[in-house]
Amino acid sequence: MNLSTEEMDQTSTDMVDSSRGADNDSRNTRRPGKKTMKAIIQDKYGPPEALELREIDMPFVGDNEVLVRVHSAALHIGDSFGVRGTPLLMRIATGLFKPKYGVPGFDVAGRVEAVGKNVTRFKPGDEVFGECNGSCAEYVSTGEDKLALKPDKLTFAEAAAVATSALAALHALRDVAKIQPGQSILINGASGGVGTFAVQIAKSYGAEVTGVCSTTSVDMVRSIGADRVIDYTEEDFSQGGQRYDFIFDNVENRSLSDCRRALKPNGTLILNSGTGAKGIRLLIRLFKPLVLSPFVQHNLRRYLSVPNHNDLVVLKELVEAGKVIPVIDQCYELNEVPDAIRYLENGHARGKVVVSVIEHDN
């Protein structure tokens, strides 16, 4: 779908903030007289097969928002949670009984088509990357603070792979760990979306990095900068005798006692996974480290990664300096999003899974 400049100017004028009072369900359908777009969408929670390619209304553009023509999107395991509506805690954000919007995808890269009247950082034509709600669509509208100019050296597909996972890694290492040159860190799940960025960002801070991954990913994790790589099918990091200042656990497939055994005295365990437990077990898993932490010598931490413009600029600078390179495992077309989510659910993606929305434009 292509709109002229005049049409986009009218779109940004008409789709004012007051229009956001419209019922969310109406955004999942076509309304007479409204501009539409293609999107992958679901009307109810369920398996990836619940998703379908459909024409829906284009998103509104608020005064502080940017309308982006999506070139590429990227997916992570959180998108699977949103599609299935599990764990149930997810529904606080996505809708209690059915999806509020129903379009998956948080990572986006594309070109600015229109801006709200209060937006100062961007103008139509700018190439941007960042976070939004519903990037598996031809257009998204998102806050100005959730975007940054795309690194020139990255394609749209590569740029789409950055925001969510790289921000999660940056916030864990810089803000929670406050990692310093010469300190040691073990990254469990070093070959995943967050893990591949964590290895590179930790190295950019001068840390000594050990990555844990499967046999098929050992060479890749070493190639992005890990000083040492542990193949978990051959070696148990909690039994090896090596002690670390930090463990960044993106898998949480080991007990707290196992992880603490591999920490130095006063070391920090940073936990970053929502998989592997449901119901009461999930609540226990989420809160047990926080309750236990004051009573043990180690610091047990969970954290929340919130997207913002300044940190996206930090990532852009790391990319442009050659210190961070996105690792892309698979690239799917828009109508193949259900297959992409199934692939993520298998748990063996190496790096990021990307969705091409505009063909041959990356």
Image: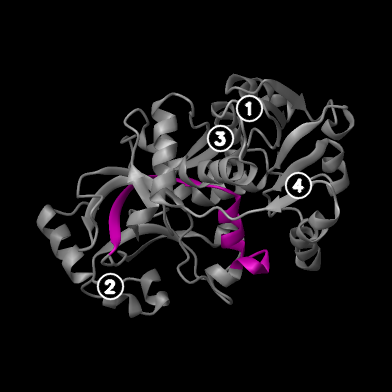
Q: Which amino acid does label 4 sit on?
A: Glu
Question: Regarding mark 1 in the picture, which secondary structure is present there?
Answer: loop
Q: Name the residue under label 4.
A: 252
Q: Name the residue under label 3.
A: 197
Crowd around label 3: few <14 · some 14–19 · many ≥20 (10 Å): many
Q: Which amino acid does label 3 sit on?
A: Phe
Among the two numbered marks 2 and 4 on one chain, the one whose residue lies closer to the N terminus: 2
Residue 84 in magenta stretch? yes
Image location of residue 99, percent across then percent down: 52, 70
Q: Mark 2 points at which residue?
A: 17
Residue 357 is at least partly visible in this image: no
Magenta range: 64-90
- Which quadrant: the C terminus? top left
Q: Name the residue under label 1.
A: 207
Q: Which amino acid does label 2 sit on?
A: Asp
Give 162 or 337, whichever is nearer the viewer.
Answer: 162
**Position of 287 compared to 126: left or right?**
right
Q: Do the residues labelled 1 and 3 touch (CB within 8 Å)?
A: no
Q: Do the residues labelled 2 and 4 touch (CB within 8 Å)?
A: no
Image location of residue 302, percent across then percent down: 68, 53
Real-space Cα separation, disc 2 to disc 3, in angstroms: 36 Å
Give the residue drawn at x 58%, y 77%: 97
Real-space Cα separation, disc 2 to disc 4, in angstroms: 41 Å
Question: Regarding mark 4 in the picture, which secondary structure is present there?
Answer: loop
